[in-house]
Amino acid sequence: MKKKILLVHPEFPTTYWGFQESLAIVNKQASLPPLGLITLASYLPLDWDMRLVDLNISPVEDRDLYWADVVLMGGMLVQMDSMRMVIDRARRIGRPIVVGGPAPTTSPELFSDVDLIVQGEVENREDELIDAISSLKAHGLAAEPGPAVPVCLGAPENHPDMKKAMAPRFDLLDIGKYTSMSIQYSRGCPFNCEFCDIVEIFGHASRVKTDDQVINELTILNRLGFQGSIFFVDDNFIGNKRAVRTLLPKIADWQEANGRPFDFYTEASINLADDPALIQNMINAGFRSIFVGIETPSTEALQEAGKKQNLAVNLQEAIDSLTKCGLEVMGGFIVGFDTDTPAIFEAQRTFIQSCAIPLAMIGILIALPETALWRRLEKEGRLREVTNGDQFGRPNFIPAMDERTLIEGYRNLLADLYDPKAYYARCENYIKKAAPLPTSGKEGVEDLKNLMRAVYKIGIRSKRRKLFWRLLGKAINSSPHTLKWAIIHAVQGEHMIRYTQDHVLPRLNMALSEMDRETQSTRFVTGQQPRPVQKAEKSRVPSFSFEPGIQLLQPAFSASDQEK
């Protein structure tokens, strides 16, 4: 039977990777599209009516909910507040609700009041999914409760073959609202980092699409009129090096034949630096930046985390070699490993500032559900009973380092790194080291408008205007191609700096104040100094709402975003 499906992408809170403070300057409303939902949509019957509402762009209206036969959402734990709002509104008018993605996959207990939970990847079981959705019926009026127990389609034992994956329904998007588009080439990662949930969801084997599938998706986006940056959302783009070596020349040929409409960025492991031929192929294809999970300069912490690929290289030399070739490294860093001491904060600051990494994302270690780290901490009795899911608050486990020292050190590290002078110094360092490379397409009217907005909002009105003009001067002296890079990073810097100062640091101060209140309460009740919790004491976390700061969307219905 024909259905009317309302696809709802939950809202993200303001994050580093959301660049919410920068979107107005470039006249956009969101950074990336909901690739998981539009991938799922490609597997639903063509005669079903579908509407997509991205809550990061516009709210879901009552008329949308009343129009729908079924409300379908995919989301991560960090989006739980937004998901709960949609679930509650849909239930009040009796609309059946289907949820999928990383949150329902790893924490289905959080969705006891929906109709259908879809865990794992959607490919190769679309018939089962369509039958389950087709059987859903409205619940009636708000007074009637939803289902007592939702139907759960568990994750399949075997991961699907990506060579059979369908192209996402890019036509459902309002493409002009996003700064970038996204596609996916592979799923899975060959490495085994203790804190990462990627291998738990997608496995160790890097499963890839065919070259023709990727070219087809690029062609669709080009025909829809999109030009600019495209994010390959792969957990590790070079996880299957043999396959990617055949793909890259074909992308380069396609780019040349179509006027080079796209720049690409992606995630990759640091061992890319050991493969000059592969680096050059990526550059020829149009790749201009990569996110790398560097994590820490501490070899002891890397060993603890099972980050063997990072131990096999000199990290600073590897980053420099990538930069000199023209690939900007966006780095992910973590503090709070068991082997970390208070000296780690200065070590991280020195390392990041000396490397040409303008966009450095630093987070406190968090135990994600069903990861090796989660299981180890649970066994050690270190998982906390309560967490609010705030990544800029207290960790959800008992850290080995004194907790106040950890949070204070983390706060001071972020304050130092996103001090305007420090951020712009890293940008200048990049310009000094990097090979200038051309970017996609031709400069158009919209590029000129973006330049004028940046000049007005940063070069004239901002307190950072002197730093802005100094950076542009360095860029012009380097290469005309570098000027666009400098403007983009000045715009991104507005978000990074303001978000750190206005949101992150106050939240970390709140976490410290909470600790002070707990200490005072303990002293008042006992009349003694509070006794630190020992690792042997047992506690358990039933569930929590956390995702790491990096908001890199995955296009599987069971997507996850996690630093490498």
Image: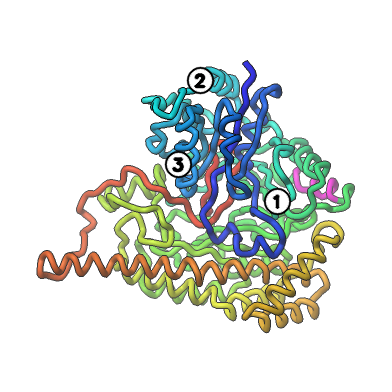
Q: Amino acid at mark 2?
A: Lys
Residue 5 screen position, x and y as percent: 61, 29
Residue at numbered disc 2: 137
Q: Amino acid at mark 3?
A: Arg
Residue at numbered disc 3: 84
Numbered mark located on residue 177 in the image: 1
96 falls in the magenta region: no
Q: Amino acid at mark 1?
A: Lys
Of the numbered discs 1 and 3, the one sitting upstream in the chain is: 3
In the picture, residue 557 is in which quadrant?
Answer: top right
**Front residue of 139 and 122:** 139
Q: Relative to 425, is 225 above or below?
A: above
> Badge 1, how many Cα within 10 Å: few under 14, some, many 20+?
some
Residue 469 screen position, x and y as percent: 72, 81
Q: Relative to 313, is 193 above or below?
A: above
In the picture, residue 412 is in which quadrant?
Answer: bottom left
